[in-house]
Structure formats: structure tokens, C-alpha cells
Amino acid sequence: MRFFSGAAALAMGLLTSSLVAAAPPVTPVDRSVDLEIRGDVESRAPPTCHSASNRACWTSGFNINTDYETTAPPPGQTRVYALNITEHDNWQGPDGVVKQKVMLVNGNILGPTIVADWGDWIEITVTNSLRHNGTSIHWHGFHQKGTQLHDGANGVTECPIPPGRSFKYRFRAEQYGTSWYHSHFSAQYGNGVVGTILINGPASLPYEVDLGVFPISDYYYKTADQIVEDTRIGGPPAADNILINGTAKHPITGVGSYAQVVLQPGKRHRLRLINTSADTNFQLSLVGHQMTIIASDFVPVNAMTVQSVFLAIGQRYDVTIDGSAAPGNYWFNVTFGGQNFCGRSNNPFPAAIFRYANAPAGLPTNQGTRPVDSQCSDILNLSPVVQRTVPVTSFQKTASNTIDVHLDTSVPPLLVWKVNGSAINVNWEKPVAQYVMESNTSYPTSDNLIHINSVNQWAYWLIENDPDGGFSLPHPFHLHGHDFVVLGRSPDATPLSQTRYVFNQAQDIFRLSGQNPARRDVTMLPARGWLVIAFKTNNPGAWLMHCHIAWHVSHGLSVDFLERANDFRNSISTVDRNAFNQNCDAWRAYAPTSPFQKADSGLKMRQLEDLKILD
């Protein structure tokens, strides 16, 4: 049966063992190291109370306890950036392998870091220099209050930017911390259209050295477009390698370099971890050191010391590392858990080197031990500094607040991801925002809209992960336009066990907690389990919530919360409306001439009539 072969391929692809270990072998082929990070990241804040011994203060009247969702410092500067998206054939990557095609930001495997201070305006002109593809750039984690049309989700808040054209994004840094940006045009970011973001602001612990951003990503020799096609009928491939801060060593040839970070003896360092992957979640640890979490995504948290962190796709952790170990070289290890259900790689030993400034350069000799397997579950016992209390005893599971995730295998051999029975398929030529601005309520069903009309109320959502399907995977769910609180999830179980949990009102209400729960913009939905989240309806707009596995959202795994449509329409400025119309006019003029027509959800489901799969 074609159905069985497709589902079986998905399962077997995940369960195929890939070698994993605590660290690279002591004697790899090549001893070279590169991309050394020494710190300190440039402090762009004006002279204020913010200092190495008092990071909690920012400036007069603004500190770590300020509720950044309602208050931000007066605008300081406007930070201006230009990003050029280019296309390259037969490109040699960091580990020496030549890739058929990549798409890069300003010619680099990692785009430039966007740096600003809390309260600044950020203005970024994106030029599309690709040959045939459109693009749009999403500024991950920013709430975009009042600048909804700058969220960068084509088919929702804008049309794609056509080749040869530019679009200016402008929004305010009302949050602070660490994030990233990436293309939201199909699975394009998997081809290299990514970069990092650093917003200076207060912190919950003092530290002396800011080491800056430290992105970690899966890396494939095939193009993202090829993998999108492959995963329509089977499981994803293992990542060919893992890039750490844009570099890697080939596991067989030894070509390439280890990323290197320099620690100052006796100093406390801040490191900003970011998972910019398309498909892979990571377990991270540093031999001989603990890490102390001070922020999760854009949410400052009370300091929490851990031996390792599970970092889901799209998540960020700001951590501090004390330079208190014996001077030397230490492996920073990237490992995989959950029986390969949330990531695997053909590189069995992805790692970086952390070296003390007074130690000779060289490879570490202590490989360390594997951290405790998180089983694809992220950390929920975080305590945000700015607290929220959310009523949970009145929560009732209903059809209107239940979001059902399902892998549809009813049309063999295809694998289609659906939410509430529908795979999202946005219209690049007429985004949701255009319907809103025209007061046109004839929204296409394929936009997967969930309408929210309540004002400044908690909206609760129960997400259930295919409890009656043939096979279930963990999913990193990301919400645009909001941070959500994680009120609870199903009991912990290994993904391999496929333990079925359906939310039981009488029993599971006691698993929910609204007393300052973890708050962030990405969290893990357990395999065959459930998750309860909530967010305050205080930001009118059209906000996607989707799985951040690129192939899953490309095959339909997303909904779009249309929040307070009338308020959304009335809040759009004339300048933003005109820019929207100009870009959409340009895209609609270009689209009929493109040699490559839309082939998936448009976000990262090829229509059935477009498929060329033979029996």
C-alpha cells in the first residue's frame, strides 16, 4: 500500500540510528579552529545605570522589572540596515562540500547581526536579488504592535518581494534580548536566508563579558526545495552537518573549522544561544561548566542554573557561563535525543571549542559525558521576571479552543500536515491583510483563520497532537505577534513510546498552572500528547502559529489567528498601507512571468493537481 510505505518511510527515517557521542574524538583529522569569539559585544546604550555590576538597571525609570509589553524607553536612535538576498550555484560550504545552490544574506552563510538598544527603531531595507524567487523576511519574536504589516509573513501580512525589488521594514524594539530573522517564503530559509538579532537591555544577573550571538543550525547538502519534495512521501534526511556560528568540520574529511569562544578567567560571560535550524532540535552542554539561564526567547527570567539546555527550533536562551574552571580548552557539545524523533545528523560529534584566554590553543582532551536526554521536551519551570497570573480553573476544553494537529495520509503516497482538518495554503497575490484593509470577510478556507474578537482577554488554546493518528512527532510551535504562557502539557513520555494522551477535563485541569508560568514564543508539542497555552488579546493583527520544522509548515502545519480585525484595519498607517500596495502591485505584475509557480503552503502543500508523482 502506498499509504503504508509513506508513513513507514517517515517512521523509519526517524528511527534510523545515527551515531551520537559526547564530543568529537580526541584526534580528529584536522586540528584547525576558527571563528573565535572573544567579546565584548559593543555596548550601544548611552551612559546609564547599566553596568557590569548592575545589569538589572537600564536607564532612569526602566529596568529588569519594567513590563516591556506595555512600556519601553523613549525611542533613541533609528538603526539602519540593508540586506541583499542573493543566489549562488556550486557554492563551497564551510565543511568543504560544494552545494548545488544556496541563497545568502549579504553574501554570507549568516546574515549580519541586527544590533539595537531597547526602545530604538529598526529600519531594514531588504533587496531581492534572487533570479526567480520572491522573498519576505520575518523578524522572529517581535510583537510588531502598530507595525503589523512588517511581520514579514508573505500571504498573511504582505506579498512576497519580487526579484529586483526592495522593501523597507520598520519596527520598534519594544522587547530586548536575543532573536533571529529568516525568510518566510516557502522553505527558503533552509537555503541560507537567516541572520541574528541582538537587542541590548537589562538582565537578571550581572556579567562582565557579552560574547554575543551563538547560532546553531542543521546543514544539508541538498537544497531545501529538494527536501520539501522528498518529505512529501517520506521522512526527512539526517542533517549532513551542524553549523555552529556558521562553521563546521566535515566528519570524514576533516575539512573546515571548529567555532571557538574565548573565556576570560574569573569573569562571568553572557552567551546568546539561537537554534536557526530547519528540522533539528539540540541538547547543548559545556564540559566542566554549568550554564545559568537568564532569558528564554525574548522573556527575561530569574536565574536558573542547569547542566545542559534543550534548544528547540526557533528558541533562544541567554545564558551566563562563569570562567571559574581550570584554564584550558573545553568541548561545547551538541547532542541529539528522543530516539532521533527531534533531530539527527550524519556528523556524530558536532562541537565548538571554549578556550580560556591564558590557555594554549589546541583540542580539548576531556570529551565529557552525554547530558540527560530531555526526550524532546523543553524547560517549563522557568520563572519570568515580569510576572503574569493566568486563571486556569475556569478553562474548559471546547471545539472552538481545541487545535487538532494531524498527519493526513489519506491520499497515498502523500503526507500532508493539517490543523483542524485543513492544511494552510496562503495566497501570495492576496494576503490576509488585504482582505482586512478592504473590509472583505470572504476569507479563503485555506488561510486557516481563527477569528478572535475579544479585547484584552486571555485566549486559551488546547493543542492536541494526532492522538488517533498512525504516527506522531514532537513539534516546535511558534506564535507570531505574541509571547504565550505555557499553562501545562501532557505527562512526559518518550516519543518512541507513542504514549497516547488526550486532555481529560476532570483529571488534567490539575496539570495546569497559571502562577507565573513559562512564557515565550516557541515551545514543544509532545508526540501524541497535548499542550495548553494562552495569550492576551492585546495586539490586533494576523498572527501565524505554526510548526517551525520547515518541511511541516511547508506541507500545511499552521493556523492564522486573525485578532480583532476591525482594530487591526484601523491601526494601519497610510504609509504602511501604501508600501503594502506598492509591493503587492509589483509582485502581482511579476508572478505570472515566474518560471517557478507556488508549490507548497507558501510559508515554508503543493496543490494536488500540481503533483507529478507516478504510481
Image (cartoon, rainbow, N blue to C red):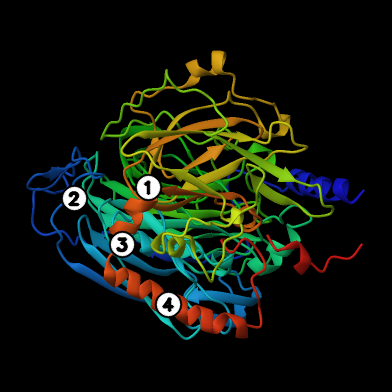
Looking at the image, do the residues carrying marks 4 and 1 touch, with CB atoms under 8 Å apart? no
Q: Callout 1: helix, strand or loop?
A: loop
Residues at marks 3 and 1, CA–CA distance in whole angstroms: 13 Å
Q: Specify the quadrant of the image occupied by residue 427.
A: bottom right
**Which of label 2 and label 1 is nearer to you?**
1
Q: Which residue is mark 4?
A: 583
- Residue 442: give x, y in percent of width and height: 53, 57
Decide: is 315 above or below 435: above
User: Which quadrant does the C terminus fall into?
Assistant: bottom right
Of marks 4 and 1, which one's residue comes earlier in the chain? 1
Specify the quadrant of the image occupied by residue 123.
bottom left
Mark with earlier residue (2, 1): 2
**Nearest to the observer: residue 408 or residue 239:** 408
Q: Residues within 10 Å of mark 1 (few under 14, many from 20)?
A: some
Q: Which residue is depicted at the point 52% across and 33% down?
A: 401
Instruction: Read off the residue under disc 3.
Output: 572
User: Which residue is depicted at the point 53% across and 53% down?
Assistant: 351
